Image (tube, rainbow, N blue to C red):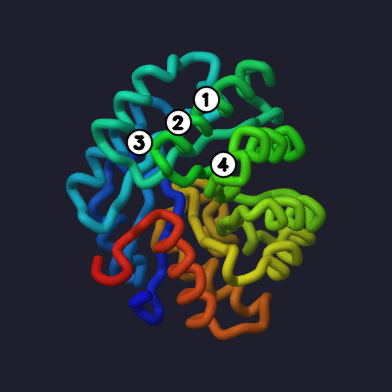
Amino acid sequence: MGVRVGMLIDTHCHLHFDAFDADREAVIARAREFGVRYMVCVGTDPVTNEQAYRLSRAHDFIFHTAGLHPHHSHEVPMEGIRKFVGETKPRAIGEIGLDYFKSEADPAAQKKAFAGMLRLALERDLPVIVHSRNAFEDTLALLRSEGGGRLRAVMHCFSYDAGALKKLLDSGFLVSFTCNLTFKNAGSLLDVAASAPLDRLMLETDSPYLAPQVYRGRRNEPACLVHLSEFLAKKKGIGEETLRKATSENAVRFFGLPASGG
């Protein structure tokens, strides 16, 4: 596919969030120095969708998405997002999904918004980035019912068990893991990540959240993807270059990114 050996792709970051306002360009430059060729800047509502888009316009190696996070699913009408998608041509719809942990939106409102965004993704032939917390069965049920076998989806920041991973993979979807795998209490989640097949796996930082153990309590950033790559490769018992190449090829294919360059 032309993916460079050693190339890393941060498939989920929020560089447009205010946590990076003071030094955003330095953070971006540092990521490039550490081998992060591409960064997918993920929107969560109309305001952050627009911010991610503007950032993608400023850097040809940053790509934007259009999302409606479950936390905002009861606040935002979809008409504006639909118009935005048509005008800006994002690389994916997301992040979208269900969150029964602490969202102010009730499950019914979340499901309605999630279903609507999945239909939009199908209309535009775009992949989806899925957020799911304490809501796996409902999330998977909607992906299956709305997708009808046609959806391309990744569950980002995967946090469920081996059984959930199998159901997701059996449905044809991908998984993405973050730097929380390096936490001292990662435990069974790290075992689940190690079992994920290379051809269905992507890497992300979810910056500014979930900094790796070595920077625990501090802001995360795309350059920290090197820690995740090294850590997961060691756990899987494979060479780091093998992991980097496979996950980058998956990201290029999933998001329709340039196969080389950046």
Name which residue type carries label 4: Val
Question: Do labels 1 and 4 touch, CB within 8 Å?
Answer: no
Q: Quadrant of residue 187?
A: bottom right
Q: Position of residue 16 (x, y in %)?
A: 33, 40
Task: Answer few, some or many: residues within 10 Å of disc 2's Cα (few below 14, many 20 plus, some between 14 and 19).
Answer: some
Give the mark, 4 or 2, whose residue is nearer the N terminus.
Answer: 2
Q: Position of residue 114 (x, y in %)?
A: 57, 28
Task: Tell me the element at label 1.
Answer: helix
Q: Quadrant of the N terminus?
A: bottom left
Residue hosting label 4: 130
Residue hosting label 3: 18
Distance in Å between CA atoms under marks 3 and 2? 28 Å
Q: Position of residue 21 (x, y in %)?
A: 29, 40
Question: Do labels 3 and 2 touch, CB within 8 Å?
Answer: no
Task: Answer few, some or many: residues within 10 Å of disc 1's Cα (few below 14, many 20 plus, some between 14 and 19).
Answer: few
Give the mark, 3 or 2, whose residue is nearer the N terminus.
Answer: 3
Give the mark, 3 or 1, whose residue is nearer the N terminus.
Answer: 3
Q: How many marks?
A: 4
Task: Tell me the element at label 3.
Answer: helix
**Residue at position x 36%, y 56% in the image:** 39
Q: Quadrant of the C terminus?
A: bottom left
Residue 181, relative to residue 1: is it above or below? above
Task: Indicate left or right for 142 with 80 as reference.
Answer: right
Distance in Å between CA atoms under marks 4 and 2? 14 Å
Residue hosting label 1: 116
Name which residue type carries label 3: Asp
Task: Indicate left or right for 64 with 139 as reference.
Answer: left
